[in-house]
């Protein structure tokens, strides 16, 4: 059986020239490879500036990789064919507030990807929007709301609805829980887990919160300075970390809990 | 005598629907050398409390309190000069959102050196002062865990990641060696190892220098790690306050219970991928506050009496305000 999403030797290099004679500053994402199956969750953890967000952007096609391939269901994704990719891999952005257009109603925000990517007529689009809103636990009336009328948790749900509206197979999320309050955060976590169970989504997410990472993820990817330091099953990595950096992270987390 | 003593602080904001109580009879006490956590979700008025202690509240808002004193001196009736002096010498604040609260037009080094008070550098001639300031600034930076100081002293806030700016904020708050540090969400968005580093630094300052800390956050993991006592806030009402270990072992208010349940790290028996316990709904906005106990509409134990504001009750040092606390069974 082929994996839902498999990434092989993905690399990326940024070169920045400083001044005239200044040295060249470089950031390289070293070869990254991983696989996830349908219904599985992959968590990416690491320092700030370790290339986690970059990896997420590479997956959804916001950046073009310097080398390597991404396969979806065994089929290679062409870096130039954005349409093919955005139908299947969707992203939830870090700041749910800033990523919603303040001038458009929620209904319009959700309709936009349907207009651009599908052949549906106005009526079918409307139906799809309403269904998606119901799916994420909002009311059909919320399509007439604007960004400022929604609470944090509801905005996060709209972000999720925008990702789900095209029936994707993989969702990539960049720190989806960071800005949320504890009770709203648990609601969102529950919602994502329930949707994953129902729809068989692959879910890739970036987080700082190791408690949640341990709770919901199946696999883990630890990154440091553009290198993948460690990867494997979450429980294995948490219980028997191999690299020094992972051990430091896990120890820090444990020391916070056991006091 | 407590260091900071606030009793029944009420803050009212004028809106189109009349005056709204953004803070409703909040009480808070802080002893010298104590680390107190102030917990609440966003919109619960944590930052408003911080601002009213510091005095950074717009003048047309109504602020009333039975008592609000710093070491026995009344803060409300005090002249603004005297209050300023206290804020300069004794109280330091780390504000939320470091990138926005730093000056974007001055380099971080300038801002940090500006916050070093003159009495720390009274030795030497005036032309040696700048070098001394720099030395102190570098020392402060090393203390908060920034090693490459020369790179960051020249930089502007917009060019640096959040956690470095946050560390600069902490460094400049500690520059005047205050007696009380008010930290408004100091570990937000930080990665675990950096977070542990900052928490250790604050704990060390508390142990060695006897610095009292008011730790405002909603990161329960960080709080339970360093705080001795805790006050839980919901929608501008104090819900429960007491010793940290008491609250963690046996919360009496349904809201505190729900908060503790929502952190998966606290519960070791939880099987992976099982749903987490939550309260339904979200925090109401200021325009639509429910009457009585503000948790009412979301509370699993709510009954008819909850439309009246519950009085504060106590068991030893453990204060709570609820009609139907968890240790009593429902009728």
Image (tube, rainbow, N blue to C red):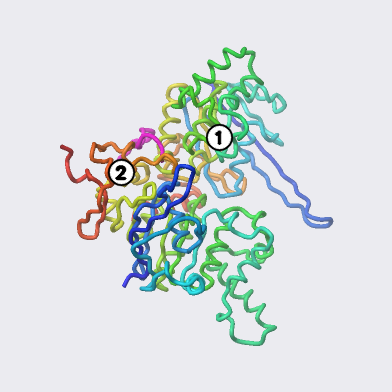
- From this view, report whether residue B106 is shown above or below residue A91: below
Can residue A235 be seen here?
no
Q: Which residue shows up at 68% across the image and 47% down it?
A: A27
Helix, strand or loop at mark 2: loop
Q: Mark 2 points at which residue?
A: B292
Is B247 inside the magenta-drawn segment? no
Q: Mark 2 lies on which chain?
A: B
Give a yes or no on whether discs 1 and 2 share a subunit.
no
Which label is found at residue B123? none
Please state the horizontal and vertical placement of residue A244, each as a whole percent of the image. 50, 52
| Label 1 crowd (10 A; few <14 / some 14-19 / many >=20) | many
User: What span is in magenta?
Assistant: B268-283
Up-down relation of residue A113 to residue B63 (above or below): above
Residue located 28% across and 36% down the image: B300
The quadrant holding residue A72 is top right
Which residue carries the number 1 mark? A147
Q: Residue at x 52, y 49 (%)?
A: B189
* Residue A58 position in % (x across, y down): 64, 35
Q: In which quarter of the image is the C terminus of chain A?
A: bottom left
Q: Quadrant of residue B288?
A: top left
Q: Is residue A135 left or right of residue B323?
A: right
Residue in the picture at 45% in, 42% down: B17
Depth order, front residue of B37/B74: B74
Point out residue B13 in the picture as x, y percentages from the top left corner. 46, 51
Q: How far apart are marks 1 and 2 (CA)?
A: 29 Å
């Amino acid at each position: 059986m082929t994996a839902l999403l498999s990434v092989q030797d993905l690399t990326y290099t940024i070169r920045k020239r400083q001044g005239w004679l200044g040295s060249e500053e470089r950031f390289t994402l070293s070869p990254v490879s991983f696989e996830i199956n349908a219904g599985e969750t992959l968590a990416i953890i690491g320092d700030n500036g370790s290339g986690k967000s970059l990896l997420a952007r590479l997956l959804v096609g916001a950046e073009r990789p310097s080398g390597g391939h991404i396969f979806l269901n065994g089929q290679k994704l062409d870096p130039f064919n954005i349409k093919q990719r955005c139908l299947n891999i969707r992203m939830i952005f870090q700041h749910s507030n800033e990523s919603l257009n303040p001038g458009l109603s929620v209904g319009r925000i959700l309709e936009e990807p349907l207009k651009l990517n599908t052949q549906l007529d106005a009526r079918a689009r409307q139906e799809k929007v309403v269904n998606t809103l119901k799916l994420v636990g909002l009311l059909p009336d919320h399509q007439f709301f604007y960004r400022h009328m929604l609470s944090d948790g509801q905005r996060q749900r709209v972000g999720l609805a925008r990702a789900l509206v095209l029936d994707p197979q993989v969702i990539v999320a960049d720190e989806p829980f960071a800005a949320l309050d504890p009770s709203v955060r648990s609601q969102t976590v529950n919602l994502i887990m329930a949707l994953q169970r129902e729809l068989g989504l692959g879910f890739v997410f970036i987080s700082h919160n190791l408690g949640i990472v341990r709770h919901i993820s199946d696999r883990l990817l630890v990154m440091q300075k553009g290198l993948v330091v460690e990867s494997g099953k979450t429980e294995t990595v948490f219980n028997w970390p191999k690299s020094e950096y992972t051990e430091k992270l896990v120890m820090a987390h444990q020391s916070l809990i056991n006091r | 005598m407590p260091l900071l003593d606030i009793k029944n602080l009420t803050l009212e904001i004028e809106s189109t629907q009349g005056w709204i109580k953004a803070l409703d009879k909040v009480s808070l006490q802080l002893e010298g050398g104590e680390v107190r956590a102030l917990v609440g979700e966003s919109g619960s008025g944590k930052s408003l409390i911080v601002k009213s202690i510091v005095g950074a509240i717009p003048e047309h808002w109504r602020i009333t309190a039975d008592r609000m004193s710093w070491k026995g001196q009344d803060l409300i009736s005090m002249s603004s000069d005297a209050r300023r002096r206290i804020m300069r010498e004794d109280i330091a604040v780390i504000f939320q959102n470091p990138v926005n609260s730093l000056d974007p037009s001055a380099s971080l080094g300038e801002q940090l050196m500006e916050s070093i008070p003159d009495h720390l550098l009274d030795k030497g001639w005036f032309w040696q002062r700048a070098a001394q300031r720099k030395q102190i600034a570098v020392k402060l930076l090393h203390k908060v865990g920034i090693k490459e100081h020369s790179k960051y002293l020249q930089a502007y806030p917009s060019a640096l990641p959040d956690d470095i700016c946050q560390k600069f904020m902490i460094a400049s708050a500690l520059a005047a060696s205050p007696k009380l540090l008010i930290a408004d969400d100091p570990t937000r968005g930080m990665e675990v190892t950096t977070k542990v580093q900052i928490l250790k630094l604050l704990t060390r300052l508390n142990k060695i220098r006897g610095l009292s800390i008011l730790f405002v956050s909603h990161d329960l993991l960080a709080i339970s790690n360093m705080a001795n006592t805790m006050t839980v806030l919901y929608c501008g009402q104090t819900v429960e306050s007491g010793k940290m270990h008491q609250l963690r072992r046996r919360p009496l208010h349904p809201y505190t219970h729900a908060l503790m349940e929502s952190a998966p790290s606290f519960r070791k028996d939880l099987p992976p991928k099982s749903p987490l316990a939550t309260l339904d709904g979200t925090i109401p906005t200021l325009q639509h506050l429910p009457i009585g106990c503000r948790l009412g509409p979301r509370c699993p134990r709510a009954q008819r009496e909850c439309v009246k504001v519950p009085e504060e009750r106590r068991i030893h040092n453990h204060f709570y305000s609820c009609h139907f606390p968890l240790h009593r069974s429902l009728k």
